Amino acid sequence: MKSRNLHRAATLALVAIAATGSSAAAQIRVVATTPDLASVAREIGGDKVSVVALAKPTEDPHYVDAKPSHIVTLNRADALIEGGAELELGWLPPLLENSRNSKISAGAPGRIVASDGVKMLEVPTSFDRSKGDVHSLGNPHFMIDPVTVKIVARNIANHLAQVDPKNAATYNGNLSRFNAKLDAKYADWQKQLAPYRGAKIVTYHKDFVYFAERFGLNIVDELEPKPGIAPSPAHLAQVIGKMKAGNAKVILVQPFQNRKTAETVARQTGATVLDTPEQPGAASNTNTYFDMMDNLVHTLAGGLGAQK
Amino acid sequence: MSADFQIAWEVMKWPFVACLLFPPLLVYLGLHVVKREVIFVDLALAQVATLGTCIALLMGYHFDDRTTFWISLAVTFVGAAFFSWTRSTQKGPVPQEAIIGITFVVAAAGVILLLSRVAGGKEELEHLLTGDILNVTKGEIGQRLIVFAALGGFYAAFHKRFVLISSDPEKAFADGVRVRLWDFLFYAAFALVVVSFVRLAGVLLTFAYLIVPAVCGTMLAQEWMKRLAIGWGIAAAASLIGLWASYKMDLPTGAAIVVASGLLLAIVGIFSSARRA
């Protein structure tokens, strides 16, 4: 059984090489589960890698619809970057099993887990799926924290250097450049958001926890009663009460979340709904991680500023 | 064999095997369902099965847990018993199709209610509808093959009796056949088929495999065996077209097969009405 699988994997690999031609063999084929990871990988890999993301920018990273191309892409990959912390638990494992690519199997140098070494927030002390708990390893939405992203970038650089040792110096150089750019940007983002330290925000899902902690924002509540559970009338009434009492005036939503729910709450509370996508490419002209963060900070500062 | 084809084959192999192995029994059951004019009974049972799955999810079991399967099956058996009980030999003023329709709607609404308390309920709902035939594994196919083979044997052994009950329940009753009991056995086995296939392929694809080929067969032929043969051909063709389109155009696999079977039905419909004219 095992040897048959091996044989199949070998056939697939040979076929993949034959199909893509030898010119592409020069570049390392990197597959990222989400566009934010893909963007960081492009910064680190430069022209030594080709990067594709499996999830669309407007898709919920927890739920991605499986398509044949995903299996083909994974089968041909030299490296896979996943968010980790069970972000992709609902859809990645069966795709990986079907892609039969040992280069990206768990523990291989080609398997990059972005969350490795990240100090996770909200790690539950007890876990019960029937109570709506989804993440036993903590909140996986850490990519919009610029400090944490440095860890992710280092993870990517380290693994790429193992997969492709002859270009290790390039990857490390790109990492330094990325970090320097991030430092400059981070200072700018801090300046933009400095006036709103302690400002109260409401989010749809628990996807702004790291950002809020980093920039000193105060998350009053989420529209979801529990992560992944659709907002119920009773919970929304509670949120509306809290928003009125605490004078919270902005609600942040992602493209795949129910904006109508946010708008209903906004109508009741005089708040503004802000579109704050966390994936590059979801808003226009935000093709890179930096563009996305610029847009996020700008939108948030604008929304909070208008409320003052 | 070209390299591109070989990759396509590696990716689509198990879905392909599943889409050829399982439909024959579904088509056979579909012929009964069409004959009985209870077209939506499978959709209703599939929905009841889904309701059972949701109850399990709410209890904290995972979608793939064995317990989830048993809970789903138990709930579906209740539905099967209900349908065999409501199919009275005396025709009452309320057609059974109405009961079936109501069951479907109530079960569907129940699913929405239950999933509103489950993390990622909205997505789970979509998943239950469309299934995940693309990611089917060898193991899953093997398990179901045993179930399908056993049930196929059961239906084959009592084929004559089931045909009589389906096409002429009054005569069966007059002949001394315990119609209600056999109806329950029919629906219970049917429920087992639906539950095990729905978990693999989703509600939509299950319905398509049951009804569309059977309707095509009924349009084109009179005898059971001919209808069955035509139905198998249609199911296989829809699977091939759907899988091919899914791969070539990168579409969700299950939905592609459903649409392909709808297109085939349209062609068969035009052909058969032209033949009659």
Image (cartoon, coloured by chain):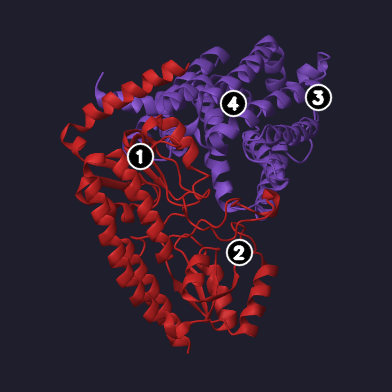
Chain colours: A red, B purple
How far apart in space, not on screen, are marks 3 and 4 (Cα)?
20 Å
Q: Is residue B271 visible?
A: no
Q: What's the residue type where badge 4 is placed?
A: Gly
Q: What's the residue type where badge 1 is placed?
A: Asp
How far apart in space, not on screen, are marks 1 and 3 (Cα)?
47 Å
Image quarter of the C terminus of chain B: top left
Relative to B175, residue B272 above or below: below
Q: What's the residue type where badge 3 is placed?
A: Arg
Whether labels 2 and 4 belong to a single chain: the reply is no
Whether labels 2 and 3 belong to a single chain: the reply is no
Subunit of label 1: B
Of residues A94 and B26, the one nearer the viewer is: A94
Quarter location, residue A246: bottom right
Quarter location, residue B271: top left
In the current view of this chain or complex, which residue is farthest to the bottom? A308
Tag 2's secondary structure? Answer: loop
Relative to A172, residue A10 above or below: above
Tag 4's secondary structure? Answer: helix
Tag 1's secondary structure? Answer: loop
Label for residue B30? 4
Whether labels 3 and 4 belong to a single chain: the reply is yes
Q: Residues within 10 Å of mark 3 (few under 14, many from 20)?
A: many
Relative to A240, residue B39 above or below: above
Quarter location, residue A17: top left
Residue corresponding to mark 3: B180
Subunit of label 4: B
The spot of residue B250 in percent (x, y) is 35, 39
What residue is rendered at 33% in x and 77% in y? A188
Label for residue A224? 2
Subunit of label 3: B
The residue mark sitting in front, 2 or 3, is: 2
Label for residue B250? 1
